[in-house]
């Protein structure tokens, strides 16, 4: 990227509620420019790995036939995972990454850098990747589960004087959003467990509100039959979402050599196919887990 353009990006500031907040240095917390700059800075890292591990004698990169060390690179903004066939190769990769980042004024975080065997697993973007019986599975990480349970628990603790409708209205976007983020992974059992945890917290919430009432009275006041399901936390206006309501839909990768600004027709057709596939799986009685 042109340094002048980058400098303008960094000092452009941000607008919130029609007010300009200038930035003299760095980027605003949570701003969209931060991952864009990270992607720009890290572009070329895969090429650097290719030149070292799967290039031909003439310098051309041939990952398909010459990748004997099983080097694979996945990046999301400034977070990335690199696979290798051995621990020795992994440490060699770390040195290549450090050399790549140095002229860009960046450093590899020692605290966040982990070299581990796939049978032991690792966390990435809220998922836990591990090989079980020679099969790689991705599940919502324990940290991600604890975070959403803590968030919901804190809201319920604050809701001592709230009516049921307000509580449901606040909780639904959190439950729905977390479930949709993780519904591409192996999440069915975890969704069911989280439903049980949230149910237990809600029962405690209801007992505190009516300490002089029995459990049967409390359950019939807040939990009702909805369709084929019994004991649904709902009112006449709305129903509390369940994590397990989100169907598991496997993610289908788009082609990596396609440009979204040039090959617009490809992405248009890809989105249509994805929508139809998800709709078909959602309406199907047998959903993959």
Image: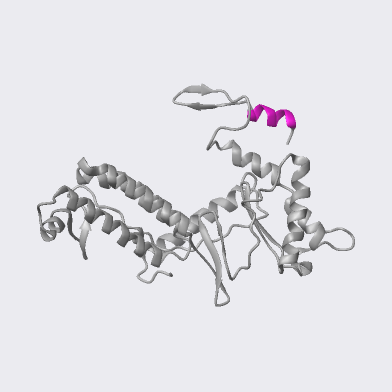
Which residue is at the far bottom?
Answer: 133
State the residue in front, 144 or 235: 144
Q: Is residue 187 left or right of residue 285?
A: right
The magenta region covers: 3-10
Q: Is residue 250 left or right of residue 13?
A: left
State the residue in front, 136 or 64: 136
- Residue 88 picture quarter: bottom right
Check the picture and name the quadrant holding the C terminus.
Answer: bottom left
Q: Position of residue 254 (x, y in %)?
A: 59, 57
Can I make out residue 176 in this image?
no
Magenta-span inclusion, residue 7: yes
Can I make out residue 130 in this image?
yes
Check the picture and name the quadrant holding the N terminus.
Answer: top right
Q: Position of residue 246 (x, y in %)?
A: 37, 59
Magenta-span inclusion, residue 131: no
**Figure check: 277 above or below 266:** below
Residue drawn at the location 40% of the way across and 52% of the way down? 148
Q: Is residue 163 left or right of residue 195?
A: left
Residue drawn at the location 77% of the way across and 60% of the way down? 92
Residue drawn at the location 77% of the way across and 54% of the way down? 95
């Amino acid at each position: 990227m042109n340094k002048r353009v980058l400098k303008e990006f960094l000092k452009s500031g941000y607008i919130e509620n029609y007010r300009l907040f200038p930035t003299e240095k760095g980027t605003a917390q949570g701003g969209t420019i931060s991952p864009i700059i990270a992607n720009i800075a890290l572009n070329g890292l895969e090429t650097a790995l290719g030149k070292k591990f799967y290039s031909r004698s003439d310098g051309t990169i041939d990952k398909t036939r010459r990748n004997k060390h099983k080097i694979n690179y996945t990046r999301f903004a400034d977070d990335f995972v690199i696979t290798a066939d051995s621990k020795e190769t992994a440490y060699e990769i770390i040195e290549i990454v450090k050399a790549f980042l140095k002229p860009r004024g960046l450093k590899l975080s020692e605290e966040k850098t982990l070299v581990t065997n796939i049978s032991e697993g690792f966390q990435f973007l809220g998922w836990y990747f591990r090989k079980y019986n020679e099969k790689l599975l991705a599940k919502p990480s324990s940290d991600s589960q604890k975070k959403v349970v803590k968030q919901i628990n804190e809201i319920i603790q604050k809701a001592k004087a709230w009516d049921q409708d307000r509580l449901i209205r606040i909780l639904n976007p959190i439950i729905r959003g977390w479930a949709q983020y993780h519904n591409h992974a192996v999440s069915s059992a975890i969704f069911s467990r989280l439903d049980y945890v949230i149910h237990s917290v809600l029962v405690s919430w209801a007992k505190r509100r009516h300490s002089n009432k029995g459990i049967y009275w409390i359950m019939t006041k807040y939990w009702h039959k909805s369709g084929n399901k019994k004991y649904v936390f709902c009112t006449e206006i709305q129903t509390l979402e369940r994590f397990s309501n989100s169907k598991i839909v496997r993610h289908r990768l788009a082609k990596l050599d396609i440009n979204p600004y040039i090959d617009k027709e490809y992405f248009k057709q890809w989105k249509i196919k994805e929508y139809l596939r998800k709709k078909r799986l959602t309406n199907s009685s047998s959903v993959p887990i």
